[in-house]
Amino acid sequence: MKRRTFLAAAGATVLTACGTASGSATKTLRYQGSAGAVTLPELAADLGFLGDVKLDWVGNTISGPQDIQSAATGQTDFGGAFNGAVVKLAAAGAPIKAVIGYYGSDQYAYNGFYVLEDSPIRTPADLAGKKVGMNTLGAHLEAMLDIYLQRNNVDPKKAEPLVVPPINTEQSLRQKQIDVATLGGILRDKALQSGGIRKLFTDYELLGPFTAGTYVFTEKFLKQNPDTVRAFVTGVGKAIEWSRATPSAQVVDRMTRIVQKRGRNEDGSALKFWKSWGVAEKGGRVSERQLSMWVDWLAGRGELGSRKLDISSLYTNEFNGVPA
């Protein structure tokens, strides 16, 4: 299978849209969720941190690039993705701006690359020709795989990343449909609890603690709805800090009740493994380094073209009311 890059068709049709916010300011934000999980905006809404701003769930996504693409084209009002995906989409001409971090890696929240206990894969060189299952290509997990291989003098092109829905990744590994499974958060802990798998490496071990992904809005939406965005960003920032200050069992209980009462016919049992969002900065504030660190990786893949990026123009903290 040839290695694919995400948003390969972007740049012509997708990126000309500036969002669909029209007329007077809106107080309702359309968004995509995640099956069996609770997003930070959903938690913020349940805690009452969004004020009079409402969330309108339009479906679920398993891909950050798809989520921010939907925001860029106006199918939703905001989306979240790996910061490298945000840089790539902006480089292709999308008028988006990152406003708050929402996930990352720390000692509790991280993404790992796992194999079966009896797998012959033990070194980076052993990944040559092996199938590595991940939620999407050209984003966080493929970046981690590339960096891991490059640091160990292995050509990243020798591995074979494949798209596998997160909910199916563990099963695909156990059934030997893939050789390596990328697992994070509650899905990782659930798989480890079942036993029979072992770790190759994690993104936290590779890069240390870092905020990995941000929520974005289009510039048009920010201009038309500044008060709504301010309520959203500040509310999500408060939810991050509430989660830090609250015992994890209480956070899990809150999220479990959110899943139960929203009635989406989903299994929320994995929520009990939640420990952290992994956001490094206070209130989810965005820093230039969060975005600039991925420019070299993307440039090395030939995915930025000749476009010059002003990283400082890709994010803003002006809507974040959580004290720094």
Image (spheres, rainbow, N blue to C red):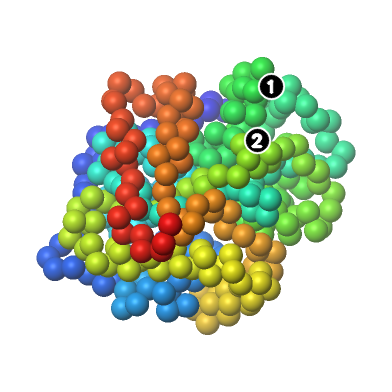
Q: Residue at x 19, y 56 (%)?
A: 223
Query: Hey, which quadrant is residue 131 in on the image?
Result: top right
Establish if 28 lies above or below 218. Answer: below
Foreground of the two, 95 or 117: 95
Q: Residue at x 41, y 62 (%)?
A: 323
Question: Is residue 28 something one can see in this rendering?
Answer: yes
- Residue 135 locus on image (x, y percent): 56, 46
- Residue 56 locus on image (x, y percent): 35, 71
Mark 2, secondary structure of its residue = helix
Question: Is residue 20 something one can see in this rendering?
Answer: no
- Give the residue furthest to the front: 324
Q: Which residue is mark 2?
A: 206
Q: Residue at x 40, y 39 (%)?
A: 288
Foreground of the two, 131 or 284: 284
Task: Count residues near mark 2 (Cα–Cα under 10 Å), then give few for <14, some for 14-19, many for 20+.
Answer: few
Q: Name the mark on residue 152.
A: 1
Tell me: 63 left or right of 304: right
- Give the residue furthest to the right: 118
**Three-letter code, disc 2:** Leu
**Three-letter code, disc 1:** Asn
Query: Hey, which quadrant is residue 291 in on the image?
Result: top left
Q: Quadrant of the N terminus?
A: top right
Q: Residue at x 40, y 68 (%)?
A: 235
- Residue 11 locus on image (x, y percent): 28, 34
Tell me: 297 left or right of 134: left
